[in-house]
Amino acid sequence: MKEDKKSEGQRKQEALSYKKKNYYEETSATEREAIFAYAEGYKAFLDAAKTEREACDYAVKAAQDKGFTEYKFGEKLRAGDKKYYVNRGKSVVVFRVGKRNLEEDGFRIIASHIDAPRIDIKQNPVYEEAGMCFLKTHYYGGIKKYQWTAMPLALHGVVVLQDGTKKEIRVGEDETDPVFYINDLLPHLGAEQMNKTAAKVIGGEQLNVLVGSVPYADKDVSDKIKLNVLSVLHDKYGMCEEDFLSAELSVVPAFRARDIGFDRGLVGAYGHDDRVCAYPALTALLDFESEHTVLAMLVDKEEIGSIGTTGMQCKVFEDVMEEISVALGANFRKVRAHSKCLSSDVTAAYDPNFPEVYEKMNAAILSHGTCMNKFTGSRGKSGSSDASAEFVGEIRKAFNDAGVIWQTAELGKVDAGGGGTVAMFVANLNIDTVDLGVPVISMHAPYELISKADLYSTYKAFQAFLC
Ligand code: MN
Ligand code: MN
């Protein structure tokens, strides 16, 4: 690499052209170790937190371990305070109060979601037929239904009993636990099924989860297998069939997070979308002190429209910000006007097996760093919050100054489809917002892939943004 051997054109090309960089190629041996070490913590988080409730509990515990305490509306605040606000056990805002003037400086916000596509149990779900007992389901979020059959599944959630007691259920994660299953058709009899479109290969009402097969030992009762399952549930959780009415139970893949590839550069797991952004949001906030007042919002219901009491569109997140502003004697309108937000959600990584849906120049390339989507939406940017050049310029400078390897992308080719995030809901509050997150292969599949380099790059990007 001797400078004098370069031609004038070569030097000009280097100075003027833009090229994405592979983070692994840019990094030092020490940082490469940090990349791999950070992924170990992330994998443990994935295995511990497969639902929004579990992710929320994890975040609260991690915050408490770092000296954060629960915040209640009306509480006084001062610079240096480390707090978290839990919303119904399904979403949480973790924040630090900085010493800068809030009206002039605003908040630095990272917003990620902790729900993931899955299969929910219906309210009246139990039946038996042909030697098997099943639970009927209604899937949650955008899944390819055929991907969820013929593999080990775990059951997670809560049941509220008649007397108000809440029982937590988590079966299928321990090596000694049983797992659950959704049947598929054998290929020998699948001729007609294989002629259907992929959307119809498995129908919504065929996603019945197999949960039992042993009859209750009493010849005088009917539906013996169902009774046996109910009996097991009663012994273990004190519940009866009616308690399913007031339950939130979900079926998720029973797989654990694993390294992918001989060189271990990738992580395969259920629910990278969007825990792969929520984890760096949480850890960056917990790990780094800042002069700004910084918030990590880990929210629910993004996969079904961000609505309801725990989704990003709920007023509670605005309330938290307003309460903090009031507690610090700041005008909330001024605070919002000066706040900045990274809406941190995953994007689609370019997949060479499906090149037809990507435009490679503007696609996220695996291991080329955390990825900014200036806008999302579909067909003419519809339904998107399009970040301004000024705000993107500010973030770009912060990342480059901090040596963050990052890239930009759109979600697929123009007219190929698209998607949305929580960005618009924050931006609607008059807060500059842009999407930034980890590129994912096989997004929304039961087992998704991400690069450890992109995960770590996101963590570093958050540090640059928050501090
Ligand atoms: Mn997402
Ligand atoms: Mn998603």
Image (spheres, rainbow, N blue to C red):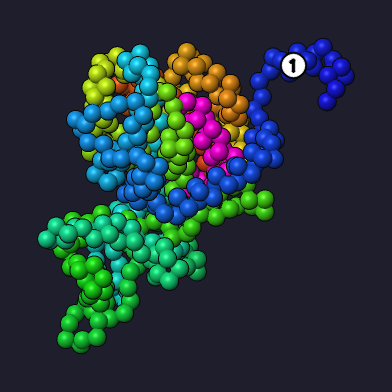
The question of residue 465 being in magenta is answered with yes
> Where residue 325 sits in the image (x, y, percent)?
27, 22
Judge the density around disc 1: few (<14), some (14-19), many (≥20) Cα neighbours within 10 Å: few
Q: Is residue 170 rendered to the left or right of residue 246? A: right
Q: Is residue 49 rendered to the left or right of residue 227? A: right
Q: Is residue 383 rendered to the left or right of residue 402? A: left
> Where residue 13 sits in the image (x, y, percent)?
74, 16
| Quadrant in the picture for the N terminus | top right
Identity of the residue drawn at 19% across and 30% down: 74
Q: Nearer the viewer, residue 269 or 298?
A: 298
**Would you say residue 317 is visible in this rendering?**
yes
Q: Nearer the viewer, residue 259 or 380?
A: 259
The residue sitting at the bottom extreme is 219
Identity of the residue drawn at 64% across and 44% down: 33
Q: Nearer the viewer, residue 235 or 205?
A: 235
Above or below, 299 against 217 in this view is above
The question of residue 449 being in magenta is answered with yes
> Where residue 375 sits in the image (x, y, percent)?
45, 24
**Three-letter amino acid code at disc 1?**
Gln
Res 21 → quadrant: top right
Q: Which residues are magenta?
A: 442-467
Q: Is residue 315 rendered to the left or right of residue 45? A: left
Above or below, 241 against 388 in this view is below
Identity of the residue drawn at 33% across and 69% down: 211
The residue sitting at the right extreme is 5
Identity of the residue drawn at 28% across and 81% down: 215
**Would you say residue 274 is visible in this rendering?**
no
What residue would you read off at disc 1? Answer: 13
